[in-house]
Amino acid sequence: MNAAHDTMTVEQAYRAMLAFLQREVELTESSDLADLVSEYKLGPDGQTRDPALWEEWLEAVGKVVRPQAPG
């Protein structure tokens, strides 16, 4: 994968983040991280279990895609 030229949708990025965190759970066996991943998983309808969580994700994406000007 060439990260400099590849793009993802917001949902694909979310799923990638979940896959990354799940791998970290498997490597570290961290129960705290496992609990977090469990809360962030998508339901059968493709939505987060907590709608506010998705809004927080979109806010985080916005900070990366459109960084705020300093000060």
Image (cartoon, rainbow, N blue to C red):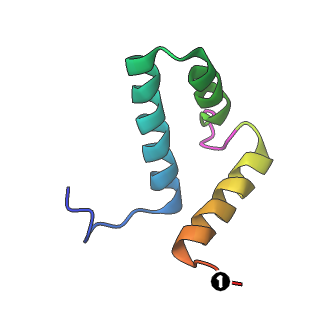
Quadrant including the N terminus: bottom left
> In front here: 29 or 17?
29
- Measured along the vertical axis of the image, is residue 6 above or below residue 69? above
Element under disc 1: loop
Q: Is residue 48 shown left or right of residue 2? A: right
Amino acid type assigned to the residue bearing label 1 in the image: Pro
Q: Position of residue 64 (x, y in %)?
A: 54, 69
Quadrant including the C terminus: bottom right
Q: Kindly report the secondary structure that dominates the magenta region of the rendered protein.
A: loop
- Measured along the vertical axis of the image, is residue 27 above or below residue 5? above
Q: Is residue 15 shown left or right of residue 54? A: left
Q: Which residue is at 69% across, 51% downward?
A: 54
Q: Which residue is mark 1?
A: 70
Magenta stretch: residue 11 in it? no
Q: Which residues are magenta?
A: 43-48
Q: Which residue is at 46% across, 63% downward?
A: 9
Outermost residue toward the left in this view: 1
Q: Which residue is at 20% across, 62% downward?
A: 2
> In front here: 2 or 12?
2
Q: Is residue 9 shown left or right of residue 43? A: left
- Measured along the vertical axis of the image, is residue 57 above or below residue 23? below
- Mark 1 Cα-neighbour bin, 10 Å: few <14, some 14–19, many ≥20: few
Q: Which residue is at 42% across, 28% downward?
A: 24
Outermost residue toward the front in this view: 71
Q: Position of residue 14 (x, y in %)?
A: 52, 49
Q: Is residue 52 shown left or right of residue 29? A: right
